[in-house]
């Protein structure tokens, strides 16, 4: 048995199929992945993301510590802003991709479930003499995501903070159904939406309120097809300790001019290294799905590897992301992919595959 | 309940025999486990199969699975409609979702397959 979120019993008693994800027993689907995917693209879906790590930083040196382990620049953030960035090792490889939040009274960081312990250790190891109190609030809180074009209608009125006035990638400490909570206009689906953090004792009531309001419970299966269409990288697939942010197409989240931080020297060297593989989008002509590990070929040799692949529910065809050698990264390049011994025709396409209409 | 006029393989194929021809598909339990079927590929007519040889593949959003011959023989018909619309399998696994017809080498193969009762017991233990 893995770790369980406060919503586990709800999932299990509502027909969810449970799988292990990073040591957590999580719902992969309640109905079908295609149905749940469509709900998020066309209406609104609800996800339990309580397994993700929630860390808070307090004390006079909180900003200094975040700056030391984070590739983006936290110093230019406004109160209530959320900003994506990477935590890198000293060789410039990605330890995790994270969201940093700035509050009037401190800072917070949301990290991947699979990396939580590693990142907490890394923060402590990087702390030196800095005066910071780090708290891991993962197990005492709950986090749900409400995603889709109708997410705003569902969330509006539920919090003291006005959801309609919250800009994309901003968050507000507020009260939700009378309880202390954080409302964040962020997500991992390519749609508009919110992520809400609340004390774990109130998680089930909040979840049931969203279900009552018409949100469709969605599992990690749809979360994966949604983020893949939106070309959002997933740690352990597109991101690893061996891949640097430039290779991953995340150079925009690295601010080499912000001052010193862990991994910076290596990143300065790696940023213009044209010999490295980079992340590309791949679209297949046939119906077979190129899955993680499938070899991308050219002239009979291996020139890359697929890191994530699925059937795109929106476009009804297989899509994939992977890393390919420099000579094959250009959009329009034809590259066969070896799928179980057969070369299947694929072509490099621009990312993302899916972008919502504004 | 699974249909009582069919026999079953542990790998979730069903078999229906008429004369020396065996029609093969996959069970409702199998399609419910797969969900989200996106692709069905079947071997060509004329292909000779031993028992448990793969005769095709079924792919869902999450995974790809081989389809196994429940009896030995030669493929004499294949349901080409499935390659255009794989959702037929999910919608009607025992009817329009049939996959191939095998001209059996030995009619005795069918007796080695699971009875409806035995298959029912197997899926009850897997469904948890």
Image (cartoon, coloured by chain):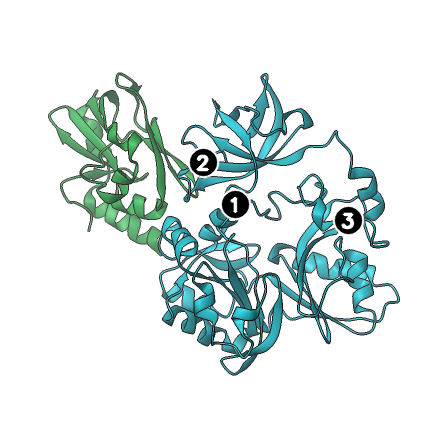
Point out residue A230 in the picture as x, y percentages from the top left corner: 53, 47
Indicate the colour of chain B.
green
The disc at residue A89 is 3
Q: Nearer the viewer, mark 3 or mark 1?
A: 1
Per the image, the residue denoted by label 1 is: A228
- Counting from the top left corner in percent of width and height, residue A29 is at 41, 55
Which chain is rendered cyan in the image? Answer: A
> Is disc 2 placed on a helix, strand or loop?
strand
Which residue position holds label 2?
A: A318
Residue B96 left/right relative to A141: left
Mark earlier in primary sequence (1, 2): 1
Q: Residues within 10 Å of mark 1 (few under 14, many from 20)?
A: many
Looking at the image, can residue A170 be seen?
Answer: yes
Q: Earlier in the sequence, mark 2 or mark 3?
A: 3
Chain bearing mark 1: A
What is the chain identity of the residue bearing mark 2? A
Asked if one can make out residue A142 in the rendered structure from this viewpoint, the answer is no
Please, is residue A44 above or below residue B49 in the view?
below
Numbered disc 1: secondary structure: helix
Query: B54 or A314, which lies in front?
Result: A314
Label 3 neighbour load within 10 Å: few <14, some 14-19, many 20+? many
Measured as percent of width and height from the top left, residue A178 is found at 52, 83
Disc 2/disc 3 C-alpha distance (Å) = 33 Å
Task: Name the secondary structure under disc 3.
Answer: loop
Q: Nearer the observer, disc 2 or disc 3?
A: 2
Q: Nearer the viewer, residue A231 or A21?
A: A231
Which residue is at a point 52% across and 52% down the rendered structure image? A190
The residue shown at (43%, 69%) is: A154
Left or right: A162 as drawn, with respect to A104: left
């Amino acid at each position: 048995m893995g770790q369980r979120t406060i919503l586990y019993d709800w999932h299990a008693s509502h027909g969810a199929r449970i799988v292990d994800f990073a040591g957590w027993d999580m719902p992969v689907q309640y109905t079908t992945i295609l149905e749940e995917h469509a709900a998020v693209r066309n209406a609104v879906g609800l996800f339990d993301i309580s397994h993700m790590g929630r860390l808070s930083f307090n004390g006079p040196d909180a900003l200094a510590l975040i700056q030391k382990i984070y590739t983006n620049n936290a110093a230019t953030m406004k109160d209530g802003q959320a900003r994506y960035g990477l935590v890198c090792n000293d060789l410039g490889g990605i330890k995790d991709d994270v969201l940093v939040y700035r509050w009037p009274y401190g800072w917070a960081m949301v990290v991947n479930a699979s990396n939580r312990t590693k990142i907490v250790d890394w923060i402590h190891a990087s702390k030196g003499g800095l005066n910071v109190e780090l708290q891991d609030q993962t197990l005492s809180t709950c986090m749900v995501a409400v995603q889709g074009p109708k997410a705003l209608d569902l969330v509006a009125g539920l919090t003291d903070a006005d959801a309609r006035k919250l800009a994309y990638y901003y968050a507000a400490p507020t009260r939700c159904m009378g309880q202390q909570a954080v409302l964040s206009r962020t997500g991992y689906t390519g749609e508009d939406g919110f992520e809400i953090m609340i004390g774990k004792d109130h998680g089930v009531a909040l979840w049931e309120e969203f279900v009552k309001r018409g949100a469709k419970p969605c599992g990690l299966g749809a979360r994966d097809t949604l983020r893949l269409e939106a070309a959002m990288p997933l740690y352990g697939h597109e991101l690893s300790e061996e891949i640097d942010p430039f290779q991953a197409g995340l150079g925009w989240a690295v601010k080499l001019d912000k001052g010193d931080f862990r991994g910076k020297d290596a990143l300065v060297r790696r940023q213009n290294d044209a010999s490295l593989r980079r992340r590309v989008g791949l679209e297949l002509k046939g119906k077979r799905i190129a899955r993680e590990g499938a070899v991308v070929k050219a002239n009979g040799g291996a020139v890359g590897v697929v890191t994530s692949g699925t059937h795109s529910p929106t476009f009804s065809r297989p899509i994939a992301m992977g890393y390919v050698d420099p000579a094959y990264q250009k959009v329009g390049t034809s590259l066969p992919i070896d799928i179980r011994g057969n070369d299947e025709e694929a072509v490099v396409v621009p990312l993302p595959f899916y972008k919502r209409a504004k | 309940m699974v249909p009582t006029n069919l026999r079953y393989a542990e790998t979730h194929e069903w078999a229906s025999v008429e004369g020396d021809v065996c029609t093969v598909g996959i069970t409702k339990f199998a399609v419910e486990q797969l969900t989200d079927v996106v692709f069905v590929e079947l071997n060509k007519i004329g292909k000779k199969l031993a028992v448990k040889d793969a005769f095709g593949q079924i792919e869902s959003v999450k995974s790809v699975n081989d389809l196994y011959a429940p009896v030995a023989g030669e493929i004499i018909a294949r349901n080409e409609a499935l390659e255009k619309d794989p959702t037929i399998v999910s919608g009607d696994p025992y009817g329009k979702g049939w996959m191939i017809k095998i001209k059996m080498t030995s009619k005795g193969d069918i007796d080695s397959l699971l009875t409806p009762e035995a298959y029912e017991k197997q899926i009850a233990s897997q469904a948890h």
